[in-house]
Image (spheres, rainbow, N blue to C red):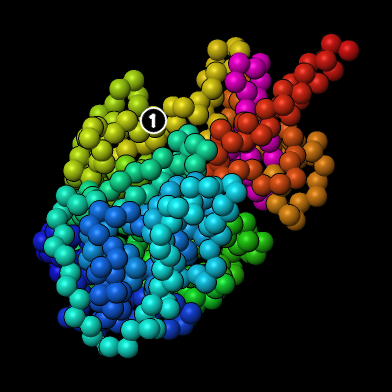
Amino acid sequence: MSSSHRVFSNVRSIFSLFEHQLSSNRICITYHRQAWTYYDIYRNVNKLSLFLTDKIKPHDEVILYGHNSPSWLISFLALQTRKAITIPLHSSQTTLLHTIQQKYYFTHKKHIPILNVKDHPRKEESMTSMFHVPSILNQIDHPTPNATFLDIDPADYVLQLFTSGSTSLDETGGRAIKLKHEHILSNLRSISERIDSKEQDFIQSSVNMLPWNHCYGLNCELLYMIGSGKTVHICSPHDNIFELCRTYHPEILFSIPKFYYKIYHRVLQYPPLFYPFLRYYLFGSNLTYGMVGGASISPSLLDFFHNKMNLPLYQGYGMTEASPMISFNTPNENKYGSVGKILSCNSVHFVENELYVQGSNIVGSNTTLKTGDEGYIDKEGYLYITGRKADRFKLSNGKFVDPVAIEALIEKLPEIAQFFLYGLNQPYTIGLVYLNPSCSLPAIQVLSIIRDHCIKHSIDYYIIPRNIIIVNTPLDHVAKGTLQRKAILKKYARTLAECYLFRQSTKKN
């Protein structure tokens, strides 16, 4: 058993994961080319915890607002020492910021778009304290203040996250999910067990692009890397991800499929002879593989990066309610098209093809998670997700359509930035298209390209869109790129209806 396996097996809290690495003098994170060792972070956690001793009480809910940064991590760890519950919100989540009511706000930003008393009269009375973390840390001169940390129980709640799936979003931006230390640690133990000891020892750093207000970026990258004593190089909103890769030469990247689709279109502009140079230019010299989650990714794209770019990508599957991982592929166990084998913390079963998950990582009083995803497990134990039950719609001819798979296929085209397929109770499908900025083709030509692409990939004729509507602004989506289907339908319901009426009246004439 590697040292990382032992750490994940023995700790009782997320903060303990971090404490286990203090004996080394390793770099924990870098930010704007400055390095912070594990002890640097700990010293500042101590400062902030001491400052908060008489201000934050156990089980207080605290908003942590802003993008990934050292002060974000310091705040998150310090709040654990006070047994508080952290609600991380990214800088882009202003809707949620104005909607949820909390008394305490932590931020590393000097200005926070939070108070509009006319629109939110309760906000002024509910917000009692706002803490600008860098200012607080600068005020405390003592290098090693002696803060008294509260004992953390594995059953304590530590996080409140918001789901980002397109079918679960409501007017506040998502459902609130509360996670305990034991939920997250259970998942991290299973992840660590699945990864070979030699791989864990080889991986030393990642360049971080995923926001920590989402379970995937927070648990699978930040907490896993910290628990393993590794280094996370933070890519701030002003950084270039590829420049950071060339500077730090990470061994692993955690990302979403959209990131690789963009690279794929860029790389295709060059002959294969240039691929080795492009690989180094984009990712540095040490990158061994990438972990991909948050949305589906086509087997052909996985094959391209593996065989053309010499960069294996391993797909996983999870949900916030599962803390978050349910399954994932690894270098030793991998099948294109699948989302890997089920983690040991989970057990799964299917009801009418819908996946249900049970396990110590499942959040809520009901320990059975109804995922809403349809799929199957093959004879070798690999899980396949075939579509989302709520996203499927039936045409008037009785045929069912899984729009997400078709949208992912069409978005591989270099002309298409986003595609939304619709056809509920209609005789055929039509699509909403947001073009890439470099494309200026007329709609009829874009439709022809889409139809040819579908035919090439053997898509059934009744699924191929008969018409498209080109929109001028991006379609509603969450940070990881998933389309917000309810919001899109609400915004374009009249446009879609008029398109069907126009086509039908044209046919009659």
Residue toward you, 58 or 484: 58
Name the quadrant containing residue 127.
bottom left
Who's the residue at 29% across and 34% down the image? 369
Who's the residue at 14% across and 55% down the image? 153
Can residue 460 be found in the magenta stretch?
A: no
The quarter in which the N terminus is drawn is bottom left
Label count reads 1
Who's the residue at 41% across and 46% down the image? 162
Q: Is residue 152 visible?
A: yes
Instruction: Indicate whether 429 appears above or below 170.
Output: above
The quarter in which the C terminus is drawn is top right
Could you tell whether 108 is left or right of 331 in the image? right
Residue 109 lies, in percent from the top left, at 50, 70
Residue 148 lies, in percent from the top left, at 16, 73
Q: Amino acid at mark 1?
A: Gly
Instruction: Indicate whether 99 appears above or below 83.
Output: above
Name the quadrant containing residue 64.
bottom left
Residue 475 lies, in percent from the top left, at 64, 43
Residue 294 lies, in percent from the top left, at 44, 48
Q: Which residue is farthest front? A: 125
Instruction: State the extent of the magenta-drawn residues as a range.
Output: 406-433
**Residue tagged 1:** 372
Name the quadrant containing residue 353.
top left
Could you tell whether 83 is left or right of 428 in the image? left
